[in-house]
Image (cartoon, helix red, strand yellow):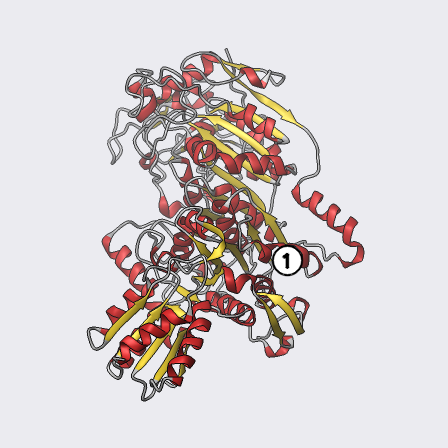
Amino acid sequence: MSTAETPTEMPLCEQAPGENPICENPVEQFLRTDRMPHIWCPGCGIGTTVNCFARALLKTGLDLRKVVVVSGIGCTGRVAGYVKLDSFHTTHGRAIPFATGLKLANPELTVVVYSGDGDLTSIGGNHLIHAARRNLDLKVICVNNLTYSMTGGQAAATTPEDSITTTSPYGAFEPAMNIPHLVAAAGATFVARWTTFHVAQTMKAMQRMLTRRGFSFLEVISPCPTLYQRRNQMGDGLDTMKHYKEVSVSNNNANLAEIGMTKSGQITVGNFLEIERPDYLEAMRAQLRNRLQERYIEVGGAPCQN
Amino acid sequence: MAKGTVAIKTERCKGCSFCVEFCPPKVLALSPVYNAKGYHPPQLIDPDKCTGCDLCGMYCPDFAIHGFRFPKAAAEPAPTVGAAA
Amino acid sequence: MHADPTGVLTGTHFLNGDQACCEGALAGGARFSAGYPITPSTEIVERFSKRIPTIGGVFIQMEDELAASIAIQGAVWAGAKAFTVTSGPGFSLMMEHIGLAAMTETPCVFVDVQRGGPSTGLPTLPAQGDMMQARFGSHGDYPCIALCPSSPQECFTLMVRAMNLAEEFRTPVFLMMDEVVGHMTERVQIPPAETIAVTPRKLTDKAPGEFRPYEDSEDLVPPMAHAGEGYQFHVTGLTHDERGYPSMTPATQAKLIRRLREKITRGMDRITQVEEDNVDGAEVVVVSYGITMRVAQRAIKLARAEGIAVGGMRLVTVWPFPEERIHALAGRVRALVIPELNMGQVALEVERCARGATQVIPVPHAGATVHDPQQILDAIRKGAGR
């Protein structure tokens, strides 16, 4: 059984009790509150990951004007629309190449790709592989709810075998994609997986991603009670969270080849990988400087503006 | 003596119970009342034991609750916080 | 505003159309390009990848055309002027992101060096078969600006113009080249930077709290902001309101789609570029564009030698279509002859705009080479009743 860590530093209210007991929720300053309530279902875990993200951002102390969120399409793709940052809701599967252009044209930006499993690993799978290979400095947060939710719960590349979905009515039989294994093999320099039960660990992983350089990938396993858990008689969001608590095993040294998701078996979680190698921009600059010497005009800041 | 408390925006709540279930000192319960959308938002049933740890705030998928600590100097008992939104 | 001299290779050069197009992009201010190799367009980004590190900018070769066509849009929102290049199959893959650029009003340029199709077709041989795809290829209703160069020199000048129009109207612009123009080598004159007009991006002067990314403005082109400047704005491909927020109502949809269309319609005078050659008093006018114009010129010369009063009209801007110009012309001539390297795409538009006022004679060609001038001459004779 896994445990949820209690946050070590808790938000302090600036007001004494009795004066104004309602401190603002730390997530609030990151939300487009004029768009609340959001579209996510009761018991959906996407909002939980946004809490972790907001708290992680706060802890990093990053200049929020320089933090950009890029999403693709899908339920998690709506994150870009709810965060009060420069945010782009792009096309299905293409958040990573959009983010690539943003980052390369203005390397000062901290570029976060926040999207779902179908978006990032299926229709956008090729871009995921190549961004990892390039070690492009993107922070990719993949909320994996094991299904295509926005369209009504179809089988995804991530749907565990034997799961009932609208397009696998007799049970899925394709092996589910093992995303951490894929991105690590492709060259990612930070790879983690947690569930929405592991809020503090998720927040810490996000914090680490936001402050390091290179392609960083976090998978967050999350309930889709409306479409996935319901059709598989796995209860509601809360039941799913308890299930995560029950079956998750934290192992930072796990053999990534063996951590594929199954319908109800063990979920291996952890910060699996963190290595250092030059990111895309470093490699590009070094190569061009080496070949062109003083003729090379290095890009920095917002160099492409003209 | 409470170390902290929670603030709840009842109208945002969708009644998932994550906050109730995962509250370490178990100070929350779903209220019998309904919000405008028909969900039962949480309420603080044992204010003295709330540590303000904000785990509820981390879990809440609807940004409807969060916890916070009182400054150490404060000696007043924690007030129960009602609807804020 | 004029061109930044660091990107302008002033002088007289012997370049092919692809190379000249790259120089046009640089002179027009492009400092970012993402591409994927495809014949016959590749030389454009090959040259860009060689030139840009000493000018200050970035080229990245992406994993496919889907990626290239959206990476440039990310770069635009980060502040760069950007373009990508492709040919038929890649152009097909880029369609979704052409719609995204139109919907999010992202100024960028797509260069299509047309080759024979459909499918893999004729990678190394010419066609003009993507003209309707440029106009209607992405789903939904959106405006389109497309320019057709007929020479390497024009690949330079019209690429600069394409970059400028993209900024002026905040819309994707197409430079519709073809394999012959792309690979033909001719003299290309690149003028001094101070004589090349460059349209600056229309940026907001409002404070972050007051900025609305899609607010109403007089010319229907809302000023932009760039990521990283503190505006904390939202951009979505969903139907959106003035704040950029999704708003999926009939009213919002109507307002947005009508404005996207209207901003181009209102700018027609500034966009349309048509060249006429002895149109007044002509019995027959040959309407052509791109490489086909040069073959048509030969046919026109031959027809004139036979005593036929024949004029030429060349569409430098194909989209938006110069509807009124064609209609006015149709009322004055016996026939309009439309040679093109496809089975009759722009001919359909000419027919529509002629509204029955004259005979429209398409001269279709399946591609792989250019017309034989004799084919066009025959059509001119037919139109003149000879």
Instruction: Look at mark 1 in the image and give the residue it sits on.
Output: C47
Q: Label 1: state its secondary structure.
A: helix
Residue A201 seen in the figure:
no
Q: Give whichever of C158, A69 is nearer the camera.
A: C158
Image coordinates for residue C47, horizontal then vertical, percent:
64, 58
Q: Residue extending furthest bottom?
A: C281
Image coordinates for residue C32, horizontal then vertical, percent:
59, 56
Q: Residue extending furthest left?
A: C356
Q: Residue at x 30, y 53 (%)?
A: C140
Q: Label 1 sits on what residue type?
A: Arg
Q: Give whichever of B17, C44 is nearer the camera.
A: C44
Q: Give whichever of C53, C280 is nearer the camera.
A: C280
Q: Residue at x 38, y 37 (%)?
A: A74
Image coordinates for residue A168, horizontal then vertical, percent:
31, 21
Q: Within the image, what quadrant is residue C292 found in?
A: bottom left
Q: Quadrant of the C terminus of chain C?
A: bottom left
Is C100 on the left or on the right of B15, as rendered?
A: right
Q: Chain of mark 1?
A: C
Image coordinates for residue A268, horizontal then vertical, percent:
53, 16
Q: Residue at x 38, y 34 (%)?
A: B62
